[in-house]
Amino acid sequence: MKKIAFITTLLLFLLLSKTYGQNFVGVKGGISIPNLTDGSSQQNEINSGYSSTLGPDFAIFYSAHLSKHFLLSTQLEYAAEGGKKNGFQAIPTASLPGIDQYFTAQNRPVPDVVYATYDSKAKMDYLLLSELAKFNLPFNAKSKWSFYAEVGPFAGLLVSAHQITSGNSDIYADKSQQENITENTQQGPQPFDNKENIKDDLHKGNFGVEGDVGFALNYGKGNLFIEGGGNYGFLNIQKGTANGKNHIGAGTVRLGYAFKIEK
């Protein structure tokens, strides 16, 4: 039902755009620089400390003039989201089989997290359907160059999501690395090479805002352009609260071409 609603919304946006008159259809692609921001009221050691990573971003769009300088652009975008944490960090105790026995054997409460040194990457792929209000301003009356800015809301659909970890490390009970669990249990460094599908742990839908600024060149039968911008999701992505709450967001840099459509 969610996929049907998403497709229905897409068709509705396209129909609404046509009422303003046909002007451009185009494609654009480049890189996404995503990061996961932690929800201020749901912050813990698991969901904080992410840094930016890299991924692909590309889109198709349909633009219609509202006036000489204003357009309405409907855009369907594939967006890479997520983030990475490398180095010494917390890991849920429940994700490490047998670690809880180390604490129960000593009649100690099992902590929610233990610590290790490894690389971790949250990789998520979204489809974003956006409706952007665009302002376009030529440099002068005879110039082939113009500046533009666009902003608007998006509805997002999660396509895939994986947590990818790698490395080998001792496991510690404390952040100060004074209590080495693997050493005390006569085990060696533990492997962290794993790719886990976490799509079922995340909400499938999201909504937010995105925008771009760029420069366009009147070239051939359309416009060649370069732009930089970003997107931000308003909803927490996790279903539960055990690992805190995060928001998606990314910076983008893209090249594209918009083809003029003759009326």
Image: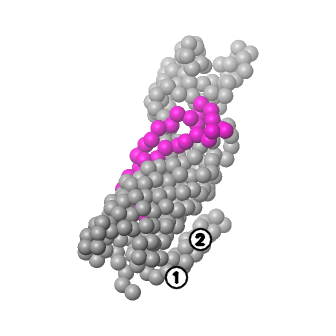
Position of residue 85 in the picture relative to residue 136 (left or right): right
**Of callouts 2 and 1, which one flags the residue occurring earlier in the amino acid sequence?**
2
Q: Looking at the rendering, which quadrant does residue 103 occupy? A: top right
Query: For residue 50: magenta?
Result: yes
Locate the N terminus by quadrant. Answer: bottom right
- Which of labels 2 and 1 is toward the front? 1
Task: Name the residue carrying label 1.
Answer: 19
Q: Which residue is mark 2?
A: 9
Q: In the image, residue 143 lies at what x, y percent?
A: 26, 70
> Looking at the image, is 217 positioned above or below residue 188?
below
Q: Amino acid at mark 2?
A: Thr
Identify the magenta region: 30-59
Q: What residue is drawn where x is 60% and y is 73%? A: 8
Residue 210 in the magenta stretch? The answer is no
SS at mark 2?
helix
- Residue 136 showing in the rendered view: yes
Query: What is the three-letter code of the residue carrying label 1?
Result: Thr
